[in-house]
């Protein structure tokens, strides 16, 4: 029997989709951390952010939750900013002997903390923590660096507990590691690095200050948009974005003005989780491609760098992505113009207004970039994110764009 195909709806191309095997989402779910960890192993190795523990009940509170599930806790690392090669190497050198303990790594913190934990979990089984040069062991597993080694052996199981609503690191397959001494920021990447479980409790984000809320929120919005328009976009992530982005656009102004608004915090935590799944299964674009190099050059936190670059990237890609941007505007505002030109422009204006409301810097000069370093920034903005940008940009084109944004 012949079944006619609806016009305009071709079959999707082949794609992969990876995500945490278990996601516990909602207020109060932190209380289940012990139960989900106990399904994966017998002991807990904890990596925590210095500012995140009070949000989760402190060290004693976490230990109590784990003890209730019969787990002994060992604190193996504390994150103090975006992870560096030295941070990962120091943690690897200090790891306890695994023996028969079946350790599960738990990451409690923002994206930087989760990335540090991912790298530790991956290299605990794929590198030699007792090597003469552990830093080189780390570098050898970063994209485009050293010996270019892959993560071939399954990492230690990882449970991610995000305490900010932005990076989506609880659902991504990579860890971003920098090296200030060697002046690079690169990813360690593998589908095996996706956390085995994510415990996303919006209550723990309520105490985030306005700066963290704004930067992480705009990072989330950037990831949702870039994954939607990315050259390598896939249908399932796009469907998720269409659900999450309107929630984030509505919720971010509310959490900035009313930090205790748990309904808005919940919407942002959901959007951040979706943004992680979307970017890891599609890709990103120019805003993220430049943000990494900007972080190296100026020490700008990742979320803030994305916030600076998002309006610039939208204008660069506006013509090529007109219909996609118009679609995003219409899903946010069902009363938006039917004309794609007007709707796309309205969306770009909407993001501009959101950045103004958040109070994030709007010019590259505002985050400390010297005009003389624009050429370096253009030459060093690349990697997987830039390859996904809808408009292919040469370093010369990018230099002109960044000069106008300075």
Image: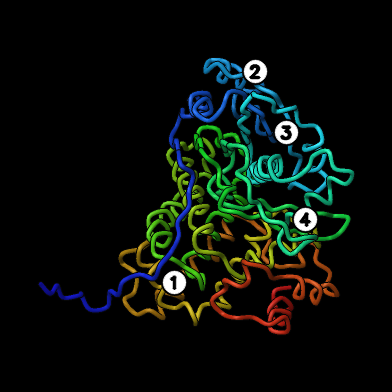
Describe the element under mark 1 as helix, strand or loop.
helix
Q: Is residue 84 left or right of residue 187?
A: right
Which of the two discs, 2 and 3, labels the residue nearer the N terminus? 3
Asked whether the residues under the numbered discs 1 and 3 touch, taking CB atoms below 8 Å apart as contact, a structural biologist would say no
| Marks 2/4: CA–CA distance | 37 Å
| Marks 1/3: CA–CA distance | 38 Å
| Marks 2/3: CA–CA distance | 14 Å
Which of the two discs, 1 and 2, labels the residue nearer the N terminus? 2
Q: Which mark is residue 325?
A: 1
- Mark 1 neighbour density, 10 Å: few (under 14) some (14–19) many (20 or more): many
| Residue 402 image position (x, y, % from top left) | 71, 75
* Label 2 vs label 4, nearer the camera: 4
Asked whether the residues under the numbered discs 4 and 3 touch, taking CB atoms below 8 Å apart as contact, a structural biologist would say no
Q: Which mark is residue 60?
A: 2
* Label 4 vs label 3, nearer the camera: 4
Which of the two discs, 4 and 3, labels the residue nearer the N terminus? 3
Q: Which residue is mark 3?
A: 50
The colour scheme applied to this rendered structure is: rainbow
Q: Which mark is residue 140?
A: 4
Q: Quadrant of the N terminus?
A: bottom left
């Amino acid at each position: 029997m012949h079944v006619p195909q609806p016009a305009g709806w071709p079959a999707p191309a082949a794609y992969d989709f990876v995500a945490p095997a278990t996601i516990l989402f909602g207020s109060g779910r932190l209380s289940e951390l012990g139960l989900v960890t106990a399904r994966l192993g017998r002991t807990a190795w904890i990596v925590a952010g210095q500012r995140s523990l009070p949000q989760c009940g402190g060290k004693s509170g976490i230990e109590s939750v784990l003890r209730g599930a019969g787990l002994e806790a060992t604190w193996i690392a504390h994150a103090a900013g975006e992870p560096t090669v030295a941070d990962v190497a120091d943690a690897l050198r200090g790891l306890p002997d695994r023996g028969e303990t079946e350790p599960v790594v738990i990451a409690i913190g923002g994206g930087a903390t989760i990335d540090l934990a991912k790298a530790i979990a991956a290299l605990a089984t794929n590198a030699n923590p007792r090597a003469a040069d552990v830093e080189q062991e780390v570098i050898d597993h970063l994209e485009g660096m050293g010996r270019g080694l892959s993560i071939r052996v399954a990492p230690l199981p990882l449970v991610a507990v995000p305490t900010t609503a932005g990076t989506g690191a609880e659902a991504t397959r990579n860890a971003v590691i920098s090296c200030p001494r060697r002046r690079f920021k690169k990813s360690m990447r593998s589908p095996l690095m996706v956390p085995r479980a994510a415990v996303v409790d919006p209550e723990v984000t309520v105490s985030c200050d306005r700066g963290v809320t704004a930067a992480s929120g705009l990072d989330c919005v950037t990831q949702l948009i870039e994954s939607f328009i990315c050259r390598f976009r896939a249908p399932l992530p796009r469907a998720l974005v269409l659900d999450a982005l309107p929630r984030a656009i509505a919720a971010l102004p509310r959490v900035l003005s009313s930090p205790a608004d748990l309904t808005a915090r919940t919407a942002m935590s959901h959007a951040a989780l979706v943004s992680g799944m979307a970017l890891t299964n599609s890709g990103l674009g120019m805003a993220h491609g430049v943000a990494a190099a900007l972080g190296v050059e100026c020490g700008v936190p990742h979320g803030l760098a994305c916030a600076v670059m998002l309006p610039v990237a939208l204008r660069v890609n506006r013509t090529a992505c007109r219909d996609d941007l118009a679609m995003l505007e219409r899903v946010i505002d069902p009363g938006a113009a039917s004309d794609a030109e007007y709707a796309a422009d309205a969306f770009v204006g909407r993001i501009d207004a959101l950045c103004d409301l958040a109070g994030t810097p709007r010019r590259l000069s505002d985050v400390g970039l010297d005009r003389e370093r624009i050429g370096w920034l253009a030459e060093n903005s690349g990697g997987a994110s830039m390859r996904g940008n809808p408009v292919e940009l040469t370093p010369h084109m990018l230099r002109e764009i960044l000069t106008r944004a300075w």
